[in-house]
Each structure stands twice: as C-alpha cells, then as structure tokens.
Image (tube, rainbow, N blue to C red):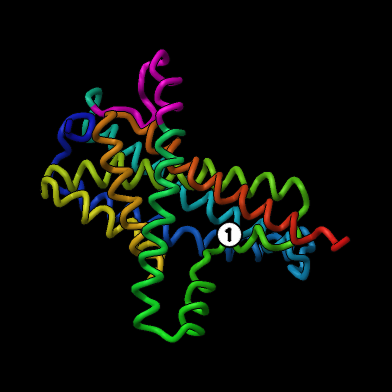
Amino acid sequence: MASAGGAALPPGSVRAGVAIMVAGLLAAPWARAVARLVLERFAGWDFQVPWQTAAVALGSVWVQNGVWVALSAAYLAAVAGRAAPAPLGPRLRELAADVWLGVRWGVLLLFVNGLTARLSLAVWGRLLPHDELMARVERERGMLLSLFEGTQPPWLLALLVFTVAVVAPLGEEVLFRGLLHRALRAHLGRRAFFVGAALFAAIHLYAIHFLPVFVLGALLAWIYEGRGSLVVPVVAHGTVNAIVAAAHIALRSVQSVPPP
C-alpha cells in the first residue's frame, strides 16, 4: 500500500486541516442566515414556498464545500509547493481510467454501506425501542436527502442532484482525504484511517449511521492511498450519493402515481 500521494506535510498540518474543517462548518449557517436576510429584503422572498428554503439550503452546502476546497488547496500549495499534488491532478491519459475505477468502487461501496447500515440498525435495535429507533433514523436522514421528498421545480431538483453527486463529494474528499488523511498519516501511521474516518463520520452528526459513514470514510482513504489520486475517491463518493439520490427520486415518482 503506497502512502498518501504527494510530499510529506509539515507539523501543524493536522491543526490546519481541523481549522479548515471548522471554518467550512461555521461558514454554512452564516451564509444561510445572510442569504435569507438579503433575499427577504431585496428579492421579496417570504420563504413560505418550499423551493426558496431549499435553494438557500443548497447555497449553504456550496459555501461549506467551497471553503473546504479553496482553503485545503491553498494550504497544500503553500506548504508543499510543486511537490504537492493538485486535488484533481492525475495526468489526462489516466483520468478516464480513474473515473471508471471510481464508478466501480462507488457501486461496491454502496453495497458495503448498506450492509454496515443494517448491522448498525440491528445493534441499535437491541438498545432502543423500535419507535425511538425509527425516530432517530428519521432525524438522521440529513438535510439534502430530505429535500428530495419535497416538491421541487425541475431546475432545483437538477441542482440538488448535482450538489449531492458532485459538490459535496468534491469538498469532502479534498479536505478529508487530500489534506486531513495525509496529515494524520504522517503523524499516526495506519491509525490515520480510523481517526480520519471518525472525524468524517462525526461532522455528519449521526449516531445510528455513524458506523456506515465511518467505514465509508476509512475505505475512501484506503482507495486514495492505493491509487494516489483524489479522482477515484471523489468519483466513488459521488457515485454512492448519485445512486442514493436516484433511488429517492424514483421512489418519489412511484409514490406520486395514482393507483389504477
């Protein structure tokens, strides 16, 4: 197994990665609050229409992941210079192979995610009453997935799919694998897989689904090290999210069809 790609990162890189992670997490609600204020005052939005709330929520996701990509890339360029790999920096002739490998890994990770989710539910089912367990699962669906269940205009639904399948995976992989995993690997060795995966799962604020996200994070780091390119984990992550999004859209379409 090769080490994470690029030159070794200097001391303090773990702190820098955590600071960038926190900056993105804080930027999202701040951006959402500012956007609501501006749109209410200057565009006349009253946020009584579901798509207006959804649009602002998506905007905050873009801000969060934009902060992660911009600051992580800037930090890597500053501390590693020419030796640091660009976040999406394989040679062009390898790009198609990396994308195809990422798609295949994404399909496999989806099955792994489903199995670990079932295991987690089985364990929690022994600890919590069924009604409480289902209530917790409902709360952990996440903001983006909940938007698929509302009635959104086609343009916003397309933007939602793009956000789930491209924007969020890109931001998360650049930060958690491209910077944090490399920094942790230099200091912790193989324990970096577990620490980085725990951070990745923790930011999602899950309890029931902590295990599936933890396993997903560890495997994405392993994939990154094995290939030495962020393209593969970005595409794999995006493939998982895209399939889940497609399943939600298909389920909603079936449920909207009236009985014969």
| Amino acid type, residue under disc 1 in the picture | Leu
Q: Write the residue at 46% across / 48% down.
A: 65
Q: In the image, is residue 98 part of the stretch drawn in magenta?
A: yes
Q: Is residue 4 above or below residue 255?
A: above
The residue labelled by disc 1 is 145
Residue 208 horizontal/vertical position (percent): 40, 70
Q: Say which of 213 and 131 sits in front.
A: 131
Residue 56 horizontal/vertical position (percent): 64, 58
Give the extent of the magenta segment. Answer: 84-101
Question: Total of numbered circles in the picture?
Answer: 1
Q: Say which of 198 and 127 sits in front.
A: 127
Q: Write the residue at 65% across / 45% down.
A: 159
| Disc 1 packing (10 Å; few <14; some 14–19; many ≥20) | some
Q: In the image, is residue 198 part of the stretch drawn in magenta?
A: no
Given the current orientation, which residue lies at the most extreme top position?
Answer: 93
Residue 260 horizontal/vertical position (percent): 88, 60
Compared across the picture, whether 114 is left or right of 135 comes to left
* Residue 175 in which image quadrant: top left
Q: Write the residue at 32% across / 29% down.
A: 229
Compared across the picture, whether 132 is left or right of 87 comes to right
Q: Say which of 125 and 176 sits in front.
A: 125
Q: Write the residue at 35% across / 82% down.
A: 127
Q: Secondary structure at mark 1?
A: helix
